[in-house]
């Protein structure tokens, strides 16, 4: 169990640190690749720990390393596998807080697109520049371009940002980047909170309840607190 706790602490630390970097973005790109590394590793570990606890509850055992490897690295797949675990017991989805988070993650286009970018980053995109340097091309897309495309979608979804950029460029810079960060952080935190709730209110709760202290960083986030990182 000590190894499990240490792995859980690592998953939470990586995820939280990645989210904090996203919150601090101000239009530069220097730290974004660091955030993608942290988030991809943190969420994959968090998903797999959650699925391992769910299997422990159902079958009375943890998966073998080989079984866990078969889950793959795809974060969207791991997300849907986790949501499916909730669906196996109506008692879980009957809880309003859990039901709302599950419904949100099934339809939340931005959260799923964030995980898709992290998925691509984890399965090859992190080597994009190295591939280009060595071979002149890469089969994987540039992850930062994919993430920037998500930001462009958010920008174009509200005409007021275009008007503000044209009328008051300085004011645009002061207001747009904090808004963008808050939106991105909101969705990343909600994904993490859903996983944390699986440990206390869902399919991983038999053993997960004993580890509430490990996931408390996300577990106790209220809806109105999503979008900003609490003090350390």
Image (spheres, rainbow, N blue to C red):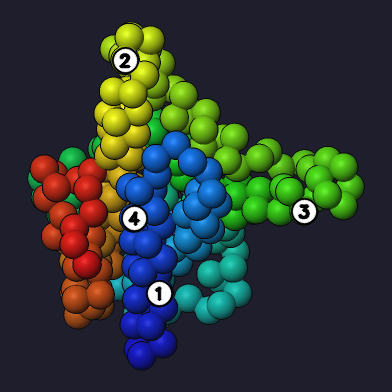
Q: Above or below — where is 69 with respect to 220?
A: below
| In this view, 65 is above or below 160 | below
Q: What is the residue that sits farthest to the right in this orientation? A: 135
Q: Is residue 140 left or right of residue 92?
A: right
Q: Earlier in the sequence, mark 1 or mark 2?
A: 1
Give percent across and percent down for residue 39: 45, 56
| Front: mark 3 or 1 | 3
Measure the C-alpha gap from mark 3 to mark 2: 39 Å
Q: Are marks 3 and 1 in contact (CB under 8 Å)?
A: no
Image position, residue 180 (x, y; %): 33, 33
The residue that label 1 is drawn on is: 10
Q: Which circle's residue, 4 or 1, is located before the other in the chain?
A: 1
Label 3 element class: helix
Locate residue 103, reporting x and y percent.
Answer: 26, 38
Residue 217: quadrant of the picture: bottom left
Q: CA distance from mark 3 to mark 4?
A: 27 Å
Of badges 4 and 1, nearer the viewer stands: 4
* Residue count near mark 4 (Cα–Cα under 10 Å), binned few <14, some 14–19, many ≥20: some
Q: Tell me: 127 left or right of 74.
A: right
Give the residue at x 68% y 38%. 141
Q: CA distance from mark 3 to mark 1?
A: 27 Å
Q: Which residue is mark 2?
A: 168
Label 1 vs label 2: CA separation?
Answer: 43 Å
- Real-space CA distance between mark 2 and mark 4, rounded to the nearest whole angstrom: 28 Å
- Which label belongs to residue 151? none
**Height in image: 11 above or below 118?**
below
Q: Which mark is residue 130?
A: 3
Relative depth, front residue between 164 and 67? 164
Mark 3 vs 4, N-terminal side: 4
Q: Position of residue 127 (x, y in %)?
A: 71, 53
> Which circle's residue, 3 or 1, is located before the other in the chain?
1
Q: Determine the secondary structure under disc 1.
A: helix
């Amino acid at each position: 169990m000590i190894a499990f706790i240490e792995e859980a602490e690592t998953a939470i630390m990586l995820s939280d640190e990645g989210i904090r970097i996203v919150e601090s973005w101000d239009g530069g790109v220097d730290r974004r690749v660091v955030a993608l590394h942290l988030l991809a590793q943190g969420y994959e570990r968090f998903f797999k720990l959650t699925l391992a606890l769910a299997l422990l509850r159902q079958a009375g055992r943890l998966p073998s390393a080989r079984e866990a490897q078969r889950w793959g690295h795809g974060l969207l797949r791991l997300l849907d596998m986790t949501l499916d675990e909730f669906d196996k017991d109506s008692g879980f989805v009957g809880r309003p807080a859990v039901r709302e988070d599950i419904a949100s993650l099934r339809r939340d286009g931005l959260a799923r697109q964030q995980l898709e970018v992290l998925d691509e980053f984890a399965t090859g995109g992190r080597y994009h520049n190295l591939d280009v340097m060595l071979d002149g091309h890469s089969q994987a897309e540039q992850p930062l371009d994919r993430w920037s495309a998500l930001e462009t979608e958010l920008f174009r979804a509200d005409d007021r940002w275009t008007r503000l950029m044209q009328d008051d460029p300085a004011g645009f810079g002061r207001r747009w980047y904090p808004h963008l960060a808050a939106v991105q952080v909101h969705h990343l935190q909600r994904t993490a909170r859903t996983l944390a709730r699986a440990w206390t209110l869902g399919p991983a709760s038999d053993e997960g309840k004993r580890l509430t202290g490990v996931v408390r960083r996300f577990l106790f986030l209220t809806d109105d607190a999503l979008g900003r990182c609490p003090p350390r």
